[in-house]
Image (cartoon, rainbow, N blue to C red):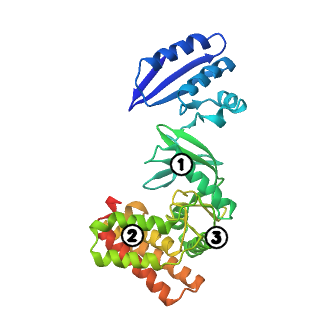
Amino acid sequence: MRYSLENKVLTIYLQGELNSYSAEPMGEEIDKIVASNEFDHLILDLESLRYISSAGLRIILKLRQTYPDIEVINASLEVYDVFQMTGFTSMMSVKKALRKVDVSKAEVIGDGFFSTVYRLDKDTIVKVFERTSDEEQIERELRLAKEAFVLGVPTAISYDIVKAGDKLGVCFEMLDCMSLKTAILTNKGRCKEYLDKYVALLKKINTTECFNPLIPDIKKYYFEKLEKIKPYLEDKYYQKLKTLLTNLEDRKTFVHGDCHFKNIMVQNDELLLIDMDTLSVGHPIFELAAIYAPYCAFNEDDPGNSERFFGISSEDAKKLYETVMNTLIMMTKSSKIRLKSLLIFIWCGGIARMSQITTNV
């Protein structure tokens, strides 16, 4: 029986069938491995286990009595069903094996700093995470997306966490779709139409109320962020940002937090969000400040960023932001005072960016 010990985590790999005939010798071998290693956490990897009977379950139950935080991972659907039907999933951590998908020859329909979106077939796309291997973080994003979907925010329907090579991904049910970036760049005659839809989507997000305590408060996040960058700011900028944050009205409306046009898909002329890990609640000013960063601030810090990231010039990126912002301002009939505070807020954020402090956040 194979096992590995890394960072005080002992992983034992079970294989074949764990039934009444194999349970006793397999249990004895597990006991020997456990007794001969020093560890803080025990994991049973069932990727190669085809079957488990009640005799096998008793071995795992015995281990749980000694190691209450034991984890079972990579259980096949059939094996997982046995754990679920017998109540094991209610008393310990049991995770199903992730379905594997091949994206090596798949069409790339969207890409960004954190993820790449591939079309698997006519009905399915997969968002592959380039910079996280934390399954719990991805599951959290799916819960946030579900909450937004239930409350009427147009999000793509996700249904499966998968493995794409050594990376994690999420499958979405999408028929004929493309990123909003591609739609705008390849259908320039419809640019205004798409921008109007973009603005309508932002307005829908920023006017939808959510009182779920599991959805984070973006104002609190910005206060935490401000304290982290405090050592790198002149005191006058720190005090101005703190005052602006303090005086901003608290709201329970959604803020997407990264709603640029590469994180939106177009399906049957409807815009759908596929990137929800930054979803929070708060004032819409945070939304505009967030989209200001990729369209404008990153170019100030790194000239040419828009060409590399969006495929458009920095001038066009800035015009796109201004068009979206101005349309939103008109739609919401915001006062000049609120607009001024927004611009100051964004300007101060730009100063912080130019001071190269965000690398420490």
Q: Is residue 79 left or right of residue 242?
A: right
Q: Decide: is 116 above or below 98.
A: below
Q: Are there few (<14), some (14-19), or many (20+) residues within 10 Å of tag 2?
A: some
Q: Count the numbered circles shown.
A: 3
Q: Which residue bears the numbered disc 2?
A: 313
Residue 208 disc label: 3
**Nearer-N-terminus badge (1/2):** 1
Which residue does the image show at 51% across and 49% down from the upper left? 137
Mark 1–mark 3 distance (CA, rounded to whole Å): 23 Å
| Coordinates of residue 204 in the picture (x, y in percent) | 63, 71
**Nearer-N-terminus badge (2/3):** 3
User: Which element is circle 3 on?
Assistant: loop
Mark 1–mark 2 distance (CA, rounded to whole Å): 32 Å
Residue 138 disc label: 1
User: Which element is circle 2 on?
Assistant: loop
Q: Are there few (<14), some (14-19), or many (20+) residues within 10 Å of tag 1?
A: some
Q: Decide: is 133 above or below 287.
A: above
Residue 224 disc label: none
Q: Are there few (<14), some (14-19), or many (20+) residues within 10 Å of tag 3?
A: some
Mark 2–mark 3 distance (CA, rounded to whole Å): 33 Å
Q: Decide: is 115 above or below 343.
A: above
| Amino acid type, mark 2 | Ser
Q: Residue furthest bottom?
A: 336
Locate the C terminus by quadrant.
bottom left
| Amino acid type, mark 3 | Thr
Q: Is residue 58 left or right of residue 249?
A: right
| Coordinates of residue 281 in the picture (x, y in percent) | 56, 67
